[in-house]
Image: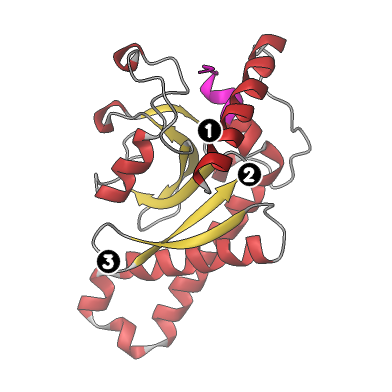
Amino acid sequence: MEIVNPSVFLLDQFPRKYWPIVATTLTTAYAAAKRAAEEEPILQIESAQDNHGRLISWAVDFGFERLIKTGRLPFDYRWNYYARPTGRFLEMRLPHSTASISQVSDPQKQPRNVVFRRNARLNNEPYFDLPEFDDEKQIKGLPHMLVMHGYQTLDFAHIGLPHPLHGRGFLYQTSNLMLLPREMADDLPPTENTDTDFDTLDLLKQDLEQWQRDNGD
């Protein structure tokens, strides 16, 4: 099993040139949710106001689904049921990983520890340098990352690789995407990464492709 630098892996799977699209889509989604709440009386009662985050979540899902359908994000997607089939969530399918979207109040902490997120982040065990999992270096599924954004107000957005242990936060996360220029031509990895990092990344991607072929995922 090849172990890679988390930042190298994230940048390979979700390149910088797409980060401004994420920020713009989130801004549009929050504005759409606010406008819908202002224009629809049903959404102005107190119980609806208390659940405005759901409206934001739907608007964000709509925006990301449209990005993928139009090819602005070169990913695939599918709607997966929660562990208890009370609803579905948008799972983005990146070249060698998956990603989901979450509202969080604190960007340094992982979102609520529900079953589908726990199962997804545990897939990150084998790929990165985690001494506590030295005996478990076996592919269980595709690595998973989170697109996180502010809860009621859009103060921040990050893409992160969650640590397999919920309380440990993130193996790596981007800077605040809401503070970046809306056009970014630089799609290069950080300068401190070496050729060895990318050789290892290529080997890991080969392992993941073999796992997908073997498991039909």
Residue 28 shows in this picture: no
| Residue found 69% across the figure and 47% down from its top | 182
Residue range corresponding to the magenta coloring:
1-9
Q: Earlier in the sequence, mark 2 or mark 3?
A: 2
- Left or right of 174, for residue 124: left
Q: Is residue 145 above or below residue 197?
A: below
- Secondary structure type for disc 2: helix
User: Who is closer to the viewer here, 149 or 34?
Assistant: 149
- Left or right of 209, for residue 130: left
Q: Is residue 159 above or below residue 52?
A: above
User: Who is closer to the viewer here, 10 or 41?
Assistant: 10
Quarter assignment of residue 87? bottom left
Q: Closer to us: mark 2 or mark 3?
A: 3
- Secondary structure type for disc 1: loop
**Percent position of residue 86, x then y:** 26, 69
- Residue marked by disc 3: 85
**Percent position of residue 150, x then y:** 40, 50
- Residue marked by disc 2: 19
